[in-house]
Image (cartoon, rainbow, N blue to C red):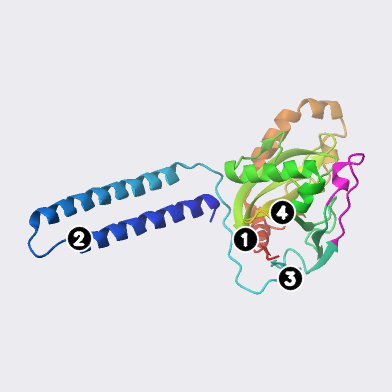
Amino acid sequence: MSHINRSYTNKLFILMAVMAILISSLACSIDFGGNSSADELALQQTAIALQQTQTALENAAQSQEQITEEPAPQVEEPTDQPDAIYEGISFSFDPNIAQGVNSVTVPGQNMGEDYMPGETYPTNFEFTFNNYAIADHFHTPKIIVYPVNEYRAISSTASDRIDALQLALLNRPGGGPISNLPFLPMWPAAQMFSAQVGYFDFQNGSGIRYLTMYGQAIYPVDNQNLIYTFQGLTDDGRFYIAAILPVIHPELPNDGSVLMEDDYMAFEANWDNYINETINWLNAQDPESFFPSLSLLDAMMASFKVDR
């Protein structure tokens, strides 16, 4: 359930409670001893209040229906004991994703303004995988949990990205070319696009997931570079979850360089058409057609709980 739905449910509960109180007041206010004029006045006042409350309920429901957002992925609720528990952080994953997990605490470092922003980070918790589903990929599959306040204190760039995620979880932007959706860690490359954008909750927070590639120049979408990422914040705003998980699709080239080896200039000139067509194609694919399936990766991220 999204934060929007949570908020609406809370409002609906409050309004229903008000109606119950009004009905109780009606019963208590009627004088069965014969003071008919006072009884009629109480009835009229209560009926008006009930009508106003009903109107408020209808308006709240109408407002909820008018909210437009990316449809949330269907994520299964975790039912078993978590597969990974480390430093108050827990999650589960399907064996089709990986056979095991390694958990470490990464010491922080503050390199100052003379270094690339990605060289500065607080002490964080990192999870890598044993026998991940994809063995040959540019990116190492990992999930990182950052403490927000500590990161903000040493990096203004990271602070801006945390703010961007908070804003995205409210506004729910979609994907597309020239994408700039929230992302940590900080890499010396640009986000080339985003596709399959979705929003969902984990056990004590919420986040955004999407497919993307990073690069220092335009490059075809391929199975060597495509990643699934989840970027989330705990409800208390204290921890940031960043997942970088390789995914492949059987209809994508394994090595995108074959699409431009004959004429890079022609590929570059056609980039806008190519990337728009590719994004539309990616969005049209069944989440189960990727490997690992997006549904399994979503379920893993939804199982996260940060209890620190």
Determine whether, in the image, residue 296 is placed left or right of residue 191: left
Q: Which residue is mark 1?
A: 204
Q: Are marks 3 and 2 in contact (CB under 8 Å)?
A: no
Which residue is located at x 34 percent, y 56 percent? 18
Task: Name the residue type under label 4.
Answer: Tyr
Pinpoint residue 53: horizontal percent, then vertical percent.
Answer: 31, 50
Q: Choose the circle earlier in sequence order: 2 or 4.
A: 2
Look at the image and give the residue range highlighted in magenta: 106-121
Task: Name the residue type under label 2.
Answer: Ser
Query: Is residue 39 one of those drawn in magenta?
Result: no
What SS does tag 2 mark? helix
For the residues labelled 4 and 3, the Cα–Cα distance comes to: 17 Å
What SS does tag 1 mark? loop
For the residues labelled 2 and 4, the Cα–Cα distance comes to: 53 Å
Q: Residues within 10 Å of mark 1 (few under 14, many from 20)?
A: some
Q: Choose the circle earlier in sequence order: 4 or 3.
A: 3
Pinpoint residue 123: horizontal percent, then vertical percent.
Answer: 83, 57
Q: Which residue is mark 4?
A: 240
Q: Residue 136: name its quadrant.
A: bottom right
Up the image or down, 261 lies above or below 170; here it is above
Of the 4 image quadrants, the one containing the C terminus is bottom right
Which residue is located at x 69 percent, y 56 percent? 238
Q: Which residue is mark 3?
A: 85
For the residues labelled 1 and 3, the Cα–Cα distance comes to: 15 Å
* Tag nearer the camera, 2 or 1: 2
Query: In this orientation, which residue lies closer to the viewer: 148 or 58?
Result: 148
Which dot marks residue 192?
none
